[in-house]
Amino acid sequence: MGKNQFSIRRRKKGMPPLPTPPVDNGEPQNSISLPVGTVKASKKKVGGARLWMRFDRWGQSELNEWDKNSIIKRAGIPTRDLRILGPIFSHSSSILAREKAMVVNLEFIRAIITAEEVLLLDPLRQEVLPFVDQLRQQLPHKSLLKVNGTSAEQDDNEGHFPNAGHWLPVPEAVEGLQAELPFEFQVLEIALEVVCTFLDSSVADLERDAYPVLDELAMNVSTKNLEQVRSLKSNLTRLLARVQKVRDEIEHLLDDNEDMAQLYLTRKWIQNQQPETLLGTIVSNSPVPAAPNLRRLNSARSRSGSLVSNHFNYYDVEDLEMLLEAYFMQLEGTRNKILSVREYIDDTEDYVNIQLDNQRNELIQLQLTLTIASFAVAVETLIAGWFGMNIPCTLYHTEGLFWPFVLCMTIGCIMLFLVILGYARWKKLLGS
């Protein structure tokens, strides 16, 4: 039985055909062909990588291309938070607190802030460069901890608080940490400063362009000036919406102490790490055997937990509240500037409408005057039409009567015009 007939029988029985053997073309058969779906998925994964800039607490930075999965694993945030940083919500403003990170989306600044580093999305954009420069200038190059006049560098890997080779007690470490703002709040302050400065400069440019255009419109109402004012008003509305979004987000945080407490990433990090660090130090330095030392470990754990809780009140958000209130007042001032420009635009529009109404009233008065004059002339025309009929009349044969009659008829029409005009003014239908 031939090979082709066997394949036909397998297809008739519903069995899959035999696999086609590879063609020997003289090349080594060491390549593995992947399914089409796998290739597409890998291409999509590579194409989904975006440019991020990483800053640590010492001001060191590096550029990396990470995909969504890498960012989620590194920052410990849910996938929906990355959608907030996407292009769909590029013009929204939000500050979200998560367990180990803070998601910041303020105007053009889209970043993920942790207790140890900040991940900045699209750092090479023109409007983001000032924020990058401020991070490089203001982030400290040494640890924030300064205990007994000695700057102590922080160990990222172990999370300890060393001081001249000895481990600090928990109160001293906490007091040194509270001497300055935590790292996440320093980054947040820089972001708010850059955003507020950008909005202030935008409002200043708007004011510089608005007042000359409005003054020109008040002097000359033309199509060109009206088009400029329309464009100006559109820009003002968009700018006011952007300022309002940032202001509302800060106001939302100020109204909720629990949300502000969730933003203290360094506090939560120390609360999670410091008791274990202290207990590990006690175990390593204790000469007592393990069994009798168990009660001591439990007491040390309770003492360390109480020390951390005493120095870290969960709802102590005074530092963050003062920080947010300062920029809230600045945004409120920016918003008031925009509202003052909008009031000036409204006043100019009211003035232009008054001018147009006045001109419209003048046209109506002129039309009424011409209507009265037309009525007087129509009366004279009516009399002339009567005498133009082919009806025999003795006045036709009277010499020297034509011009006196025309003069009297004209004077009578003028008197009629003046009487009606005086009546219209008496009724205040015409201005004086």
Image (cartoon, helix red, strand yellow):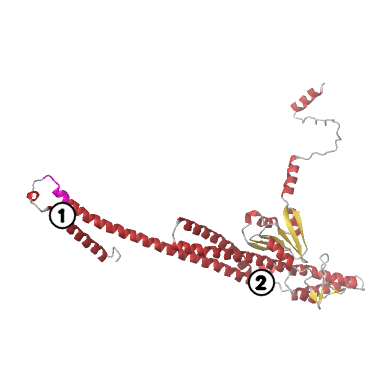
Q: Residue at x 86, y 31 (%)?
A: 26
Residue 102 visible at all: no
Residue 388 magenta = yes
Position of residue 49 relative to residue 220, above or below, is: above
The answer to which of marks 2 and 1 sits earlier in the sequence is 2
Of residue 18 and residue 108, the one placed in the foreground of this image is: 108
Is residue 377 in the magenta section? Answer: no
Residue 368 is situated, as x and y percent measured from the top left of the image, at 28, 58
Where is the N terminus found, in terms of image quarters? Answer: top right
Q: Which residue is drawn at 34% across and 61% down?
A: 361
Provide the residue span drawn in magenta: 383-390
Disc 2 residue type? Leu
- Name the one closer to the observer, 326 or 431: 431
Q: In this view, does 228 lie to the left or right of 13?
A: left
Q: What element carries label 2?
A: helix
Residue 349, x across and y down, in percent: 45, 62
At which x and y percent is residue 212?
Answer: 51, 64
Query: What residue sits 58% from the left and 66% below the top?
Result: 204
Q: Which mark is residue 323?
A: 2
State the residue lying farthest toward the top: 1
Real-space Cα separation, disc 2 to disc 1, in angstroms: 92 Å
Give the vertical position of 116 relative to 164 (above or below): above
Query: Dot 1 surroundings within 10 Å: few (below 14), some, or many (20 or more)?
Result: some
Magenta region, main secondary structure:
helix
Q: How many marks?
A: 2
User: Farthest front residue?
Assistant: 400
Indicate the quadrant where residue 22 lies: top right
Q: Name the residue under label 1.
A: 406
Q: Which tag is nearer the camera, tag 2 or tag 1?
A: 1
Q: What element carries label 1?
A: helix
Horizontal relation, residue 159 to residue 338: left or right: right
